[in-house]
Amino acid sequence: MKVYVIGNLKGGVGKTTTTVNLAYTYAEMGGRTLVIDLDPQCNCTRFFAKVNEYNKTIKDVLEAPEHINSAIYRTKYEDIDIIKGSVKTLEQKSPWSLKEALGYIKKEYDVCLIDTRPVFDVLTKNALYAADVLLTPVKFDNFCRDNLTMVEDAYHELKEKNPELEWKVFANMVANVKAQKVSSADLLGKHDYPFMQSCISRTAIVDNALSLYKPVAKHRGGSNVAQDFVDLVDELLED
């Protein structure tokens, strides 16, 4: 099982959208997929299952890693299971609980995708210490450079605890506008960030799918942006 953490220190860059659509795309390609909602807002959970305080959640997993199987639920999509988010999730004393938990199920899935909140606290470190890849969606705007500098600094600190952790960055919500072209050209020309070739287009189709709590490919399967997510998964699978 390869573990991807969708993470950034900036909100509004599409972390949950990325998690949902990568999960659906991986599953459509035949990969057995586990989604973990580590964001207390539980937005990712709402795409796949009902948020129910009486169900087991990620909080239970972090408190008792050996019982992870009791917190895994089937979703309405074949080959996608989920560990639901919890609004009651508290800061963990240990950043290693999730790594321990995933060790019990690593042979049951091909891919694990973890949605996180925009802060690298102990809760997010639980995901990153268990991860193979930190996947960072970014928007090419005036804040992109400072944002990536902060993520890069955090990544190097994380490598001390998880030396095998890779960092990959991709452009999200890409529009063909002059200001964005200037910003991206300047950024890529002056910095050596690990940008992927694939990027995700900015389109109303994504917003419409979000409002319906559907993956893009389920909402509009033949769209260009649905193909963008296929291209992104293909590139990730090349490694």
Image (tube, rainbow, N blue to C red):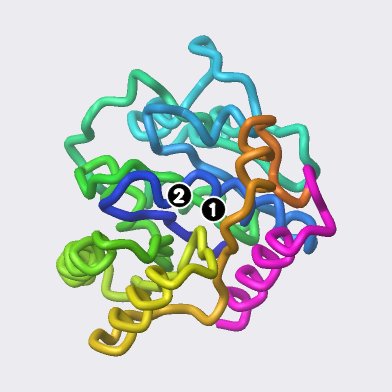
Q: Is residue 160 visible?
A: no
> Residue 47, position in %: x, y?
63, 33
Inter-mark Cα distance, 1 to 2: 5 Å
Q: Residue furthest top?
A: 54
**Stretch in magenta:** 218-239
In front of the other: 73 or 186: 186
- 35 above or below 153? above
Instruction: Judge whether residue 170 can be spotted in this image.
Output: yes
Outermost residue on the right side: it is 222
Identity of the residue drawn at 70% across and 38% down? 214
Label 2 environment density (alpha carbons within 10 Å; few <14, some 14–19, many ≥20): many
**Front-lying residue, 155 or 151:** 151
Q: Is residue 207 magenta?
A: no
Identify the residue shown where x is 24% and y is 45%: 119
Mark 1, residue position = 18
- The residue type indicated by label 1 comes to Thr
**Which quarter of the image is occupied by the N terminus?**
bottom right
Q: Quadrant of the C terminus?
A: bottom right
How many numbered marks are there? 2
Residue placed furthest toward the front:
178
Which residue is rendered at x = 51% and y = 48% of the image? 104
Q: Residue at x 64, y 55 (%)?
A: 109
Quarter location, residue 32: bottom right
Q: Main secondary structure of the magenta part?
A: helix
Q: Quadrant of residue 182?
A: bottom left
Q: On the image, numbered disc 2 is attached to which residue?
A: 15
Residue 190 % position (x, y): 24, 87
Q: Amino acid at mark 2?
A: Lys
Image quadrant in which you'd find residue 116: top left
Dot 2 falls on a residue whose secondary structure is helix
Q: Are marks 1 and 2 in contact (CB under 8 Å)?
A: yes
Residue 11 lies, with reference to residue 54, above or below; the image says below
